[in-house]
C-alpha cells in the first residue's frame, strides 16, 4: 500500500513539474540543448573572425607607423639632397640606396607583422576543435533524450509517466552539465582571444624595433653620403 502511495505522489509531482503531457519534460530539455548547441555554433563561427578583425586593426596601425617612419626619412633625405645640390654638390646618387634599404626594411616589417597576427589566430585551433566536439556531443544528447521517449512509449499512460519520471533526474543532470560545459568553453575561447591580442602586441614590438633601427641606420648612411658628395 505504501508503495502505491509513493508512486502516486511521485507521478503527481511529475505532472506538476513537467506538465500533464509526459513528453513535456523531455521537450523542455531538448529545447535547452538545442539552444545551447545553436549558441555554441554561433560562437564558433564568430570566434576566429572577431579575433582576426581585432588583429587586423592592430596590424594596420603598426603598418601605418612603418609607413610614417619610412616616408619621413625619405622626405628628409630628399630635402637634404636638394639642399646639398644647391650648394654645388651632386648628391642625387645618395637617394636610391636609401630608398631600396627602407623598402626592404618596411617589407620585412610587414611580413613579421603578418606572422605575429597569424600565429595568434592559430592559438584558437584547440578550442575550436573542442567546440566542434561539443556541438556533436549536443546532438548526441538530443538523440539520447529522444531515446527516452522511444523506450518509455509502450504501456499504459501511468507506466509511461513513471518510466519518464525515473529517467528525468539523469536527463536533467546531463543537460545541466552540458550547459555548464558550454559556458566554460566560451569563457576559455574568450580568454584565449584576449590573450591573442596581448600576444600580438608583444610580438609586434620586435619587428617595429628592428624597423626603427633600420630607418635610423639609413638616415645616418644617407647623411654621410650627402656630406661626402
Image (cartoon, rainbow, N blue to C red):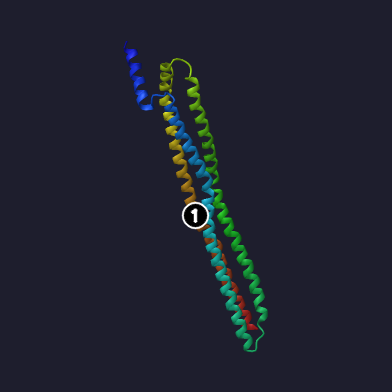
Direction front: furthest residue: 20
Q: Where is residue 29 in the image (x, y as percent from the top left)?
A: 44, 31
For the C terminus, the quadrant is: bottom right
The tally of labels here is 1
Q: Position of residue 149 (x, y in %)?
A: 48, 23
> Which residue is depicted at the point 50% across and 34% down?
138
> Which residue is depicted at the point 55% across and 70% down?
68
**Residue that numbered label 1 is attached to:** 197
> Which residue is depicted at the point 44% across and 19% down?
160
**In the displayed structure image, the side of residue 226 where residue 195 appears, left or right:** left
Mark 1 Cα shell of 10 Å, populated few (<14), some (14-19), many (≥20) = some
Which of these two is toward me, 25 or 141? Answer: 25
Q: Where is residue 228 in the image (x, y as percent from the top left)?
A: 64, 83
For residue 17, what is the image quadrant?
A: top left
For the N terminus, the quadrant is: top left
Which of these two is toward me, 223 or 24? Answer: 24
Which of these two is toward me, 25 or 83? Answer: 25
219 in relation to 184, above or below: below
> Which residue is depicted at the point 60% across and 85% down?
83
Which of these two is toward me, 143 or 131? Answer: 143
Direction top: furthest residue: 1
**Is label 1 in a helix, a strand or a loop?**
helix
Q: Where is residue 32 in the image (x, y as percent from the top left)?
A: 44, 34
Amino acid at each position: 500500500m505504501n508503495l502505491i502511495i509513493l508512486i502516486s505522489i511521485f507521478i503527481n509531482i511529475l505532472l506538476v513539474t513537467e506538465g500533464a503531457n509526459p513528453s513535456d519534460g523531455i521537450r523542455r530539455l531538448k529545447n535547452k540543448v538545442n539552444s545551447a548547441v545553436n549558441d555554441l555554433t554561433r560562437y564558433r563561427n564568430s570566434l576566429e573572425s572577431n579575433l582576426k578583425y581585432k588583429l587586423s586593426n592592430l596590424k594596420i596601425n603598426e603598418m601605418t607607423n612603418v609607413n610614417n617612419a619610412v616616408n619621413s626619412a625619405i622626405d628628409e633625405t630628399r630635402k637634404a639632397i636638394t639642399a646639398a645640390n644647391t650648394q654645388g654638390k651632386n648628391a642625387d646618387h645618395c637617394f636610391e640606396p636609401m630608398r631600396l634599404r627602407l623598402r626592404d626594411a618596411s617589407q620585412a616589417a610587414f611580413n613579421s607583422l603578418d606572422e605575429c597576427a597569424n600565429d595568434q589566430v592559430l592559438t584558437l585551433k584547440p578550442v575550436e576543435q573542442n567546440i566542434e566536439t561539443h556541438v556533436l556531443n549536443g546532438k548526441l544528447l538530443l538523440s539520447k533524450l529522444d531515446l527516452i521517449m522511444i523506450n518509455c512509449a509502450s504501456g499504459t499512460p501511468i507506466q509511461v509517466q513513471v518510466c519518464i519520471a525515473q529517467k528525468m533526474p539523469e536527463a536533467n543532470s546531463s543537460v545541466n552539465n552540458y550547459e555548464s560545459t558550454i559556458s566554460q568553453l566560451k569563457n576559455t575561447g574568450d580568454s584565449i582571444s584576449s590573450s591573442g591580442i596581448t600576444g600580438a602586441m608583444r610580438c609586434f614590438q620586435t619587428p617595429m624595433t628592428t624597423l626603427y633601427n633600420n630607418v635610423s641606420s639609413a638616415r645616418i648612411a644617407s647623411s654621410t653620403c650627402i656630406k661626402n658628395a
